[in-house]
Amino acid sequence: MSTHSEPPKSEESKTSKPLYYSEVIESLRKRFAERFPHITVADRPSPSKEPTIEITFLNRKKIPQAMNQNISLPILSFTLYFRSNPDQVYEVHHWKSSDTTLVVKAHPDLPQIGLYIELTHEQLNTQLDLGGIAPAVILQFDDQLKFIGASLSLGASAGAFGLVTQSKKLLILPFEENFPISQLTHFQFN
């Protein structure tokens, strides 16, 4: 048998009283003032019994920039440098973009000449839709034009191929079986 008993419950504790927003805020202010007496809280006008919440939805959907067959892209000349292979000089189209999503369509000269993409946005990643440019090698470079990685698109040119990269300087060249990717160090504009 137990020697202690529970105190009797009053009628008030059995039914809960609804609290209004202003009562809750006032209770929190009192507790805050007791716990942190050295900090003062500026009084604000109390809200109505039913607080109003305003929600604004922003349409941030951005249409990806697509390469157009009708645009005339400038041509750049540059040299690729390798560790133990001779340097190679190329001429490619130059596409500068501030978008984070690019759709690279097969420009009439792209399969033969290649494309240098320079990205100017401040985001970490860029998404590229590279469908229609196979077979190709996508070389990635850092801001000092040093080689940091490569991707290969070796499927059918009609197939889908996408790439997400952190590199801001990309070079797309027609795929050559004897291209020494593992020896590549950097490139320089001529």
Image (tube, rainbow, N blue to C red):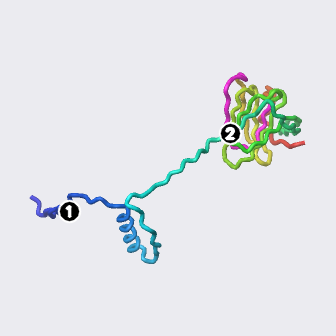
Residue type at mark 1?
Answer: Glu
Mark 2 or 1: the one toward you: 1
Q: Position of residue 57 (x, y in %)?
A: 54, 47
Q: Position of residue 182 (x, y in %)?
A: 77, 35
> Residue at point 75% right, 34% down?
67
Q: Which residue lies furthest to the bottom in this view?
A: 38
Q: Which residue lies furthest to the left in this view?
A: 1
Q: Distance between the residues labelled 2 and 1?
A: 62 Å
The residue pinned by badge 2 equals 101
- Asked if 56 appears above or below 96 in the picture, the reply is below
Q: In which quarter of the image is the C terminus?
A: top right
Residues 32 and 56: in front is 56
Q: Is mark 1 on a helix, strand or loop?
A: helix
Q: Is mark 2 on a helix, strand or loop?
A: strand
Residue type at mark 2?
Answer: Thr
- Looking at the image, tell me whether mark 2 or mark 1 is earlier in sequence order: 1
Q: Residue furthest right?
A: 190
- Asked if 62 appears above or below 154 in the picture, the reply is below
Q: Where is residue 3 in the image (x, y as percent from the top left)?
A: 11, 63
What stretch of residues is rendered in magenta?
156-173
The residue pinned by badge 1 equals 12
Residues 86 and 143: in front is 143
On screen, residue 154 versus residue 34, left or right, reads right
Occupied quadrant, residue 5 = bottom left
* Number of the label disc, if any, that sits on residue 137: none
Mark 1 crowdedness (10 Å alpha carbons): few <14, some 14-19, many ≥20: few
Q: Does the magenta stretch include residue 159?
A: yes
> Residue at point 67% right, 47% down?
123
Q: Where is residue 177 in the image (x, y as percent from the top left)?
A: 79, 26
Q: Quadrant of the N terminus?
A: bottom left
